[in-house]
Amino acid sequence: MEALKGVKILDFTHVQSGPTCTQLLAWFGADVIKVERPGVGDATRKQLVDVPGADSLYFTMLNHNKRSLTLNTKNETGKEVLTRLVKECDVLVENFAPGAMERMGFGWEQIQAINPRMIMASVKGFGPGPFEDCKVYENIAQCAGGAASTTGFNDGVPLVTGAQIGDSGTGLHLALGIVTALYHRTHSGKGQRVLASMQDGVLNLCRVKLRDQQRLAAGPLTEYSQHGEGTPFGDTTPRAGNDSGGGQPGRILKCKGWEQDPNAYTYFITQAAAWPKICDAIGKPEWKEDPDYATPNARLTRLNEVFGAIEDWTMTKSKYEVMDICNPLDIPVGPILSMKEIAAEQSLRDTGTIVEVDHPERGAYLTVGCPVKLSASPADVQRSPLLGEHNDEILRDVLGYDGEDLEAVWNSGAVGDRPAQAAE
């Protein structure tokens, strides 16, 4: 059975952070009604278009399992429809600029007056404070949340990561908040506000760097490469290149074929418990007893030499051969996998982590599936909706409009023109 079956989500989100949240809830079985502007829809429908005349992958990969309702909320009939939706739904999710819902006439106070059980969930760039009215995008969130200042190499500029930790990461945080508020409502009977700011979400994912900021007060961060290289630490957590964030020295090392393949690399961690097996594997058995190499503390000032020797060995192997040799020895390694390799990995298809979906406008495409697997409630990934595809269905089945009342809504212009329905 779908875990969130019966929960109705009124989805006023767009672009990435909010849609990530509502898509996750839809995968878990919630009925997500995506409200879009008539004739326009979510801006990402027409961003980064790769198939002319079809919704972009940017849109389709963030809006699976949802129903689309086009609604002009400036239209009086449109406001009536929205009011009825607020009465019928359990959660309203939005990621508009601050104050937009209030200007629409559906701020928190108005929502509570219409439906005291409704949960109103919002993604914002910043929480309350000096920057709360600022507009935020992915890379800004990474910079303001502490990720960029600690990413890259210490002799270079700050870097953002390819993982969308500001947008998608905050959407995941918001989904947890919504589910928690739904559970709270089961015994309180009341809704509440849920806020996830992008700065907060990024910082939550950077907690080990805040850990290291405080550790600096006690002296150098000895597991960082710069300690072994004799580079002084400043007063803030530095960029650490590809060092491990967990206290075990680790680096990305070249593998066989690196000259032609930009992803022929492996991540290699010199975990203390595995050190004797590492020495044997790379042909340095004498290091097991040598006092200059035998202990983690002794190796800290020699990490460049240690990883240089390991890399001499990994360069004779493919990244998969390194895995095959090291895994049975409990040596922690992992290949650098490209998006092309990940897309072709059959095990990810088998688990539903990557899914092929058919779309009436663009044909088959690959998308990420639900990253959280429930044993009794597996996610079934369905294609994203066409713009306004479910107008009649939602007006009739959710709000009870029928006959002349349904025609009156259409004739008012509140939901735009009747769209062509999706091919069955």
Image (tube, rainbow, N blue to C red):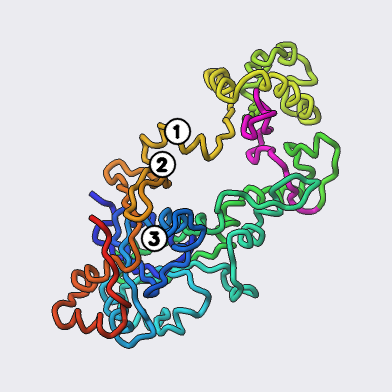
Across and down, in percent, residue 44 comes to: 47, 63
Q: CA distance from mark 1 to mark 3?
A: 27 Å
Mark 3 lies on residue: 22
Circle nearer the N terminus (1, 3): 3
Q: Is residue 378 left or right of residue 153?
A: left
Residue 322 image-quadrant placement: top right
Q: Magenta segment range?
A: 235-264
Q: Image check: 1 left or right of 107?
A: left
Looking at this view, name the residue that lies furthest to the front: 52
Q: Which callout, 3 or 2, points at the residue further toward the start of the chain?
A: 3
**Kind of residue at badge 3:** Thr
Q: State the residue position of label 2.
A: 354
Q: Position of residue 15 (x, y in %)?
A: 48, 63
The amino acid pointed to by label 2 is Ile
- Name the residue located 76 percent from the left edge and 37 percent from the top edge: 225
Looking at the image, which is closer to me, 125 or 82? 82
x and y, in percent, of residue 171 in the image: 47, 59
The residue at 31%/51% (across/down) is: 382
Q: Is residue 347 left or right of residue 200?
A: left
To which quarter of the image does residue 360 belong? Answer: bottom left
Assign a secondary structure to mark 3: helix
Is residue 56 visible in this depiction of the protein? Answer: yes
Depth check, front residue: 286 or 138: 138
Q: Are marks 1 and 3 in contact (CB under 8 Å)?
A: no
Res. 148 mark: none
Pointer 1: what residue? 345
